Amino acid sequence: MSSVLYDTPGPKARRRNAITAVVFIAVCAAALWWVLAAMADKGQLDADKWKPFVADGQIWSTYLLPGLGETLKAAALSIVIALPLGALLGIGRLSDHRWVRVPVGAWVEFFRSIPVLMLMIFGSALYVRFTDVSSDVRPLYAVVTGLVLYNASVIAEIVRAGILSLPRGQTDAAKAIGMRKGQTMLYILVPQAVTAMLPALVSQLVVILKDTALGGALLGINDLMAQYRTIPANYGANTIATLVVIAAIFIAVNFLLTSFASWLERKLRASKKSTGAVLHPEDVEELAATPGPAGPAGPVDKA
Amino acid sequence: MFDFLDNPQYDVLGAFWVTVQLTVYSAIGSLIWGTILAGMRVSPVPLMRTFGTGYVNVVRNTPLTLLIIACSLGLGSTLGITMGGDTFEQTGFRLAVLGFIAYTGTFVCEALRSGINTVPQGQAEAARALGLNFFQVLTLIVLPQAFRAVVAPLANVLIALTKNTTVAAAIGVAEAALLMKEMIENEADALFAVFAVFAFGFIVLTLPTGLILGWVAKRVAVKR
């Protein structure tokens, strides 16, 4: 295999690569050994710290699975509310009327530049002060509020970039056959933009799912993340084992979502129904930053 | 309305200073670690490529909160690693920086990798024809151009990092989010004013970053 940076290796290069690989393995093995030795030293490798996760079904049925359920619930609620709100904000930012465009733009920029944790803390305080939401569900409300405020703004940018990524001719053609502004948006631009931005939206799901962990650590929602306190308290100070298992569950769920996003992208690229423009998460900022007629979102080909 | 700012109990500027310090140290660390990761991901040794890809996929899909707590509870409390910190605060700060570097490095790596892809193949071929080896091609020809191409994406990574430093509140580092939580609990009457102060602080931190680096990105971009 040849790439930009190196040729197909010959016998000499193959030997050099093999030596590098051996050295690399040695370094990794040394690091791993050091970590394991440190863990064994503190008794973190003892069987009784890890065994409950395999041998005891209760740890799953009482802590991990309900926790995962709460995490998924918070993420699902957030996305269900943030999606339509984000779509409205995104379309509002593209409005021809200054009095719509400017306030919506200010709203989006404001909530995008505040850390999501601060929005959650603020949301929590709002519910305490101005509503009588009971304290069992308040953390969930606070987390969803924070996630919605933040992610609606991010989704608004994705929607805007998605619409801007369509060729200018689409709008011109719609005007030429006498469609009104709203019709152009509704029947021509939005449906195409939705297909283009699906991968970026699915990637945003991963971000939302990861951010729910803030609620578990700081706001007292009993989600998957929060189990890092309950499990070591009940199963004998197995903090490291618990954190590893929680991380593994998060990684597995997010890996499924990421794989789904890239599968979706391949499918969209292959299908003849769209313009073939596909929006990556990293394209969003750039496209949104360039005003005026944007060409088709020439996705930077990453061979 | 803003009289709580005069209360000596709240050191707002001090908290934001901790935020800035967290950001700067983590940014420098993740730039270095991200460059090493990117070097691994494009290296001719398949094993290093696998390691780079595996690391990026695993760490990117882990919540930052979990990484920071793992640094504090796993490395700090359980394994007794203090990173040379003498006090509890110092250790917490350094472990948090370690967590941010581990996480943000993956985003720097991905940005750089897309920058490497913008360098035309012919340049690397010419470099090889001159007899440069992989390491020389990477450090002398490709990376300098890649860095210039990815200033704007890296600016976004830096802004995200600035906001992410609030997660250090989870392990008790005395930065802006932790102080805001404390102030909101004590000054329930001034809820909106407190929120406005901290929101303003973050806008002051992130807005110039975006503007300045956006300007730099236009200046240094390689016109092709």
Image (cartoon, rainbow, N blue to C red):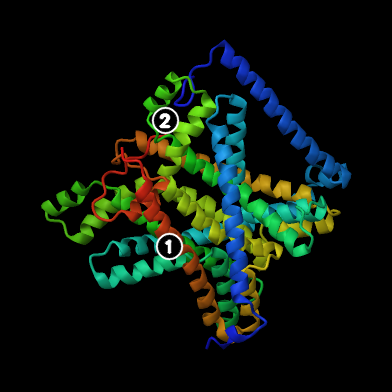
Secondary element under disc 1, as helix, strand or loop, is helix
Give the mark, 1 or 2, whose residue is nearer the N terminus. 1
The label on residue A303 is: 2
Picture residue at 67% right of the left edge, 48% below the top: A247
Q: Nearer the viewer, residue B176 or B122?
A: B122
- The residue located at (59%, 24%) in the rendering is B45
The residue identified by callout 1 is: A153
* Crowd class of label 1 (few under 14; some 14 to 19; many from 20; radius 10 Å): many
Q: Is residue B58 left or right of residue B147?
A: right
Q: Residue furthest front?
A: B130
Residue A221 in sight: no
Q: Real-space Cα distance between discs 1 and 2?
A: 31 Å
Q: Chain of mark 2?
A: A
Q: Are marks 1 and 2 in one subunit?
A: yes
Q: Is residue B174 visible?
A: yes
* SS type, badge 2: loop
Q: Residue at x 60, y 68 (%)?
A: B17
Identify which residue, A40 or A223, lies in the foreground: A40
Task: For marks 1 and 2, give the one nearer the viewer.
Answer: 2
Image spot of residue A292 (x, y percent)? 24, 55
* Chain letter of the residue beneath label 1 in the structure image: A
Residue shown at 48% from the left, 38% from the top = B113
Task: Give residue B92's position: percent from left, percent from top.
Answer: 72, 60
Horizontal placement of A177 versus A246: left or right?
A: left
Q: Judge left or right: residue B156 versus residue A184.
A: right
Q: Position of residue B132 (x, y in %)?
A: 49, 23
Position above or below: A142 against A51: below
Q: Is residue A52 above or below residue A117?
A: above
Quadrant for residue A108, please give it. Answer: bottom left
Q: Amino acid at mark 2?
A: Ala
Query: Vertical placement of A187 versus B138: above or below?
Result: below
